[in-house]
Image: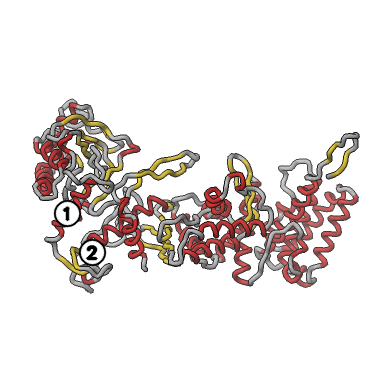
Amino acid sequence: MNWIEELRDVYQKNEALAGQMTKRIVRGKKGEEISLPLVLLPAFHTTAAAQITVTVDGEGNFLDAQEVDDRNKLTLIPMTEQSASRTSKPVPHPLCDTLPYLAGDYIRFCRLEKSGKQKNYTQQHQDYLEALKDWRDSEDCHPKVDAVYRYLSRECLMSDLIRAGILTLGEDGLLMQDAKLQGLPQEKAFVRFKILSGSALPPQGDVNQDAAYYPECWLDRSLQQSYIRYYRRRLEQEEQGMSYLTGEWGPLAACHPGKIRNEGDMAKLMSGNDAHGFTFRGRFANYGQAVSIGYEDSQEVYSALKWLIRKQGYHWGDFCMVAWESNLHPLPDPRADTDAVCGAIELEDWPEENNPTEYWGTDEMGAQRLNRAMQGYGRRFGNTSRTVVLAFDSATKGRLSMTEQKVLSSSRYLDNIQYWHESCQWLHYKYRDKKRITYRGMVGIDELIRAVYGCEKGSKHYNVLLRTLLPCITDRRPIPVNVVNTAVYKASSPVSYSDPREWEQVLLIACSLVKKWRLERDQEVWNLTENIKKESEELVKQRDYLYGRLLAVADRIEYRTQKDSKRMTNAMRYMNAFSQRPYQTWKIIEEKIQPYLQQLGTGERIVYSKLLDEIQNSFDPKEFQSNKRLEGLYLLGYHKQSYAFTHKEQQNNNIQEEETHDGFKRKD
């Protein structure tokens, strides 16, 4: 199926949830929990941010008015095809709307426009009442509709809100110009209704599990179903056509919904309402000749898309991505690091006391952990399970483009995620609860872009990089060579970083990217092991790799003798020049380390001298004397040799002496 059919399938599988207001818990920048509203829209409904809640009884008598809490402002409201796409043209929503539409006495308290003219607010209110009366007089009327109509027909909404202290007047008796509700000018406030009366209960038989009654109009599913029946009857009178999506005959969508990425997003993915511009470019007489989608089909597709984006989508400024499995089973997060991908399924599938966190010390163990995590995800999928990946971005406020679209089997999607983490597998670390956690795998895409390019979320350059890198993860595309080269260049300049930890992170990321790039280009398999002699002889005798090892040994010799751990070694200071002109720079570094080599103990000096001779003897003489620029492979040689030193030192530190009962000490 294509992505449109997949979205319609998601809606139909979850239609029982339509109209239920739920919450999604996300983490803020400081780790705090934030509760966000989440709703799968019923047909012919949309959402709006309300500032005022007006309470009336079943006879339409005003009871109370309150300002809406900012955390609870999202309101589900009925809409028409025209009102959902209204801009400058005044088209009322069927039930809840802004003050100029609802208040018959609005003109008594409003101010003139800056141009000195006054809009015809009386006509807006009359249009609203006529539309509401049509619903009220239909066979699909709901008691709450009658209560709202009775109240607003009295044309006293503004007066009631002023007496209730919701709206503020100036000395001239008009709305105070600077007064705001939730940051919005009070004259533009959106009003929703709450009905407190037994007479406003739904008719007998309307209350069931799928149509729960609430005093709040925006939560009452019986009211939602009443409007759906009413609007379907209205659409039967509209022009009919064949939907290309289902092949069925019915009313067609002329205006497709907005608010796709968020509630303030007016960019549309599909649009055909520009009959006077250049949309058709002379190829078609009307939009229906290009493509026609049923109105209700369009509602289902976009409602499912908006629900999925809010439920499990990822946002980076204007750029947005969402991935889902056909039965909405959990998927690994493509933007997460290996530890987070594995940890999410481990916490859910394994008992806490058996949950591995810190013992994945080798490449084999890291691969086993990732393998087990992918099997945990895959156990939930059936043979027909599919995964859809969509990404969106907008160049203008009015038009939304789909930058990535992929429908593939869920098993293949998991294989692609696993391949990314395995092909980039290297030693990485992160901080959790102020503790340094090491793991084997790959960092998250946010950390990669921030470390290598220094871009913050939401910037244009950040979004371009995301569009470039995400397909490498989800679709197994080759890593772009310019990304690898940038990481190598940054890692070759440790003097550019005031914090050594930042440089170390860039170095590890560069090693991951170089490893993946050489695997895809030359089919070379590089692993990080404490025994550096385990690699195949053909690989370890490469010029760039050997030069990297030399640099690591020189760095280690000087590090072992210096008292100030914050002082940068000569090897690090010359690293950038070394990567550009290795033979020429190595002679300088070799001279610089001689005094430090003499400061070492006899045994340690012999070990390092023999290691330097061993590495230099592994060179082809002509390649050693070549001043050709080093490729990123030298970073793998540098870090593998450095890791071998560090791992050996850690092993020595782990040898503990224990005192026995007779007072002697023994080595464990």
Residue 531 lies, with reference to residue 652, above or below; the image says below
Residue 59 lies, with reference to residue 130, above or below; the image says above
Q: Quadrant of residue 283?
A: bottom left
Side (left or right) of 136 relative to 36? left
**Is the residue marked by circle 2 packed among few (<14), some (14-19), or many (20+) residues within 10 Å?**
many
Kindly identify the residue that appears in the image at 80 percent across and 71 percent down: 621
Name the residue at the front extreme: 205
The label on residue 231 is 1
Side (left or right) of 560 relative to 410? right
Q: Which residue is mark 2?
A: 294
Query: Where residue 484 appears, x then y in whole percent?
Result: 58, 62
Q: Amino acid at mark 2?
A: Gly
Q: For the N terminus, give its image quadrant.
A: bottom left
Side (left or right) of 72 relative to 207? right
Kindly identify the residue that appears in the image at 48 percent across and 42 percent down: 29
Name the residue at the bottom extreme: 283
Report the front residue among 366 and 189: 366
Kindly identify the residue that appears in the image at 50 percent across and 61 percent down: 469
Report the front residue among 119 and 639: 639
Disc 1 from disc 2: Cα separation = 14 Å
Query: Where residue 174 appears, x then y in whole percent?
Result: 16, 31
Do we see residue 263 in this rendering? Answer: yes
Query: Where residue 353 appears, x then y in whole percent?
Result: 61, 44
Q: What element does badge 1 sit on?
A: helix
Side (left or right) of 524 relative to 328? right
The label on residue 395 is none
